[in-house]
């Protein structure tokens, strides 16, 4: 069992403002939770507080119900894997992995068994006699993870462990980390600034900004029901398209009209109607994902797509199975994800349809989703 609970956790560095404000997170036993957010949002600070490498200014940190705020890092039964691997350059892989166990006076048979087992899981058995300088970045990263595994900790912490790897290796290692998590059945907390890494690895994801948790939920909920503009724009690739405007109500028909009036969408038969009714006359921001803009409204019932939006495609990216088609509305760049076979040409006028029930609306002032 290893359940980690952060209750009203706050952090201020000496003489500075708060960099973590009242954070509440529960990580269930065996869960893989990812902390994600832009640079400086406080994710490393939060992880280091869990590891015991930073003091906690306020709040309670509980592991399996025990408050461990003041417990030394070595007594927390937590292992951390760092971005820069932090291997000892003069030691072999075996000794790097065995070192922490020797310090704990573990019997050498037990050490050998643990190191061999970790090396098998990570498929680095043939590297045990190498020194770090004679290995690739990906291999060094495995050794760093192996050093955590041999300790058999209650909780694994990862601080951007893949950021020194090239794109291809990052992709492969992501899949290996998923397998590792399944095999070890351990609680893992993982920090990254990369939303794709967060989406592919996390059972649940904590989105942080300026030391606040903006949403904590599963990848699919973050993607399909972002709680606010920030999460909507941060999660997803390509990012969600946004258009500012207001809700108008004429002849008892609710619709969205963009600020400059070039887009008007009848919402009167949509799922948004009830939630948007109180917003009549107010500023809202419409969000639409690239895959919900279509070249043709095939497969949608009539009430489910917008009147066509006539536009000019100003850039095209052929991805093979799909085409990213870029266009501009009221000075904002939009992107539509069209099927690979779609006949779109640069500079040609095109009519695009928006899936109405898949649109998102946000209160422009509070930035919160309107539901
Ligand atoms: N030792 C320190 N003393 C004072 N302020 C610090 C210290 N370490 C971090 N900070 C500040 O705390 C805030 C959060 O930093 P932190 O490193 O946790 O962010 P992060 O989200 O991990 O960013 P990055 O992705 O760039 O590593 C930042 O504003 C940073 O400047």
Image (cartoon, rainbow, N blue to C red):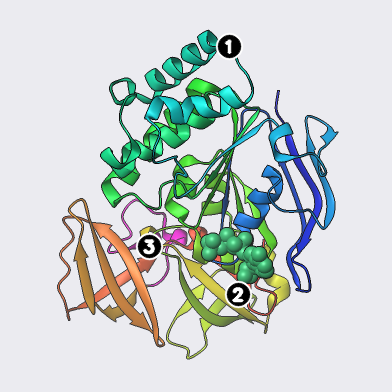
Q: Which residues are magenta?
A: 292-307
Q: Which residue is mark 2?
A: 253
Measure the alpha-carbon separation of dots 2 and 1: 77 Å
**Quadrant for ligand 1?**
bottom right
Decide: is 146 above or below 351: above
Q: Main secondary structure of the magenta part?
A: loop
Residue at 16% over, 76% down: 346
Comparing labels 2 and 1, the label whose residue is closer to the camera: 1
Disc with the residue nearer the chain's start (2 vs 1): 1
Residue 53 part of the magenta segment: no
At a point 66% along the width and 27% down the height, the residue shown is 154
SS label for mark 2 = strand
Judging by the rendered image, the residue that carries numbered circle 1 is: 107
CA gap between label 2 and label 3 equals 32 Å
**Residue 238 has which mark?**
3
Left or right of 181? Residue 70 is: right
């Amino acid at each position: 069992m290893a359940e980690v609970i952060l209750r009203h956790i706050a952090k201020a560095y000496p003489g500075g403002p708060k960099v973590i404000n009242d954070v509440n997170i529960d990580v269930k036993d065996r869960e893989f939770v990812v902390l994600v957010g832009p640079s400086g949002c406080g994710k490393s600070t939060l992880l280091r507080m869990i590891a015991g490498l930073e003091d906690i200014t306020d709040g309670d940190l509980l592991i399996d119900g025990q408050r461990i705020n003041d417990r030394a890092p070595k007594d927390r039964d937590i292992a951390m894997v760092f971005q820069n691997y932090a291997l000892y350059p003069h030691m072999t892989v075996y000794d790097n992995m065995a070192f922490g166990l020797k310090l704990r006076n573990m019997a050498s048979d037990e050490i050998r068994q643990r190191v061999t087992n970790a090396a098998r899981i990570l498929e680095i058995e043939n590297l045990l006699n190498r020194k770090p300088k004679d290995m690739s970045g990906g291999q060094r990263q495995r050794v760093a993870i192996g050093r955590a595994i041999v300790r058999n900790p209650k909780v694994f912490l990862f601080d951007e462990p893949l950021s020194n790897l090239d794109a291809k290796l990052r992709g492969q290692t992501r899949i290996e980390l998923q397998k590792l998590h399944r095999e070890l059945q351990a609680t893992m907390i993982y920090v990254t600034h990369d939303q794709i890494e967060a989406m592919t690895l996390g059972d649940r994801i904590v989105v942080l900004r300026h030391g606040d948790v903006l949403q904590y939920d599963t990848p699919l909920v973050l993607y399909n029901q972002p709680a606010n503009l920030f999460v909507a724009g941060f999660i997803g690739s390509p990012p969600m398209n946004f258009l500012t405007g207001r809700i108008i109500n004429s002849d008892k028909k609710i619709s969205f009209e963009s600020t400059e009036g070039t887009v008007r969408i009848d919402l009167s038969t949509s799922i948004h109607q009830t939630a948007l009714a109180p917003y009549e006359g107010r500023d809202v921001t419409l969000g639409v994902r690239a895959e919900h803009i279509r070249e043709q409204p095939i497969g949608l019932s009539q009430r489910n797509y917008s009147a066509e939006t006539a536009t000019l495609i100003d850039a095209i990216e052929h991805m093979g199975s799909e085409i990213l088609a870029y266009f501009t509305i009221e000075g904002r760049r939009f992107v539509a994800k069209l099927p690979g076979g779609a006949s779109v040409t640069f500079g040609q006028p095109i009519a695009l349809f928006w899936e109405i029930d898949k649109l998102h609306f946000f209160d422009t002032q509070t930035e919160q989703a309107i539901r």
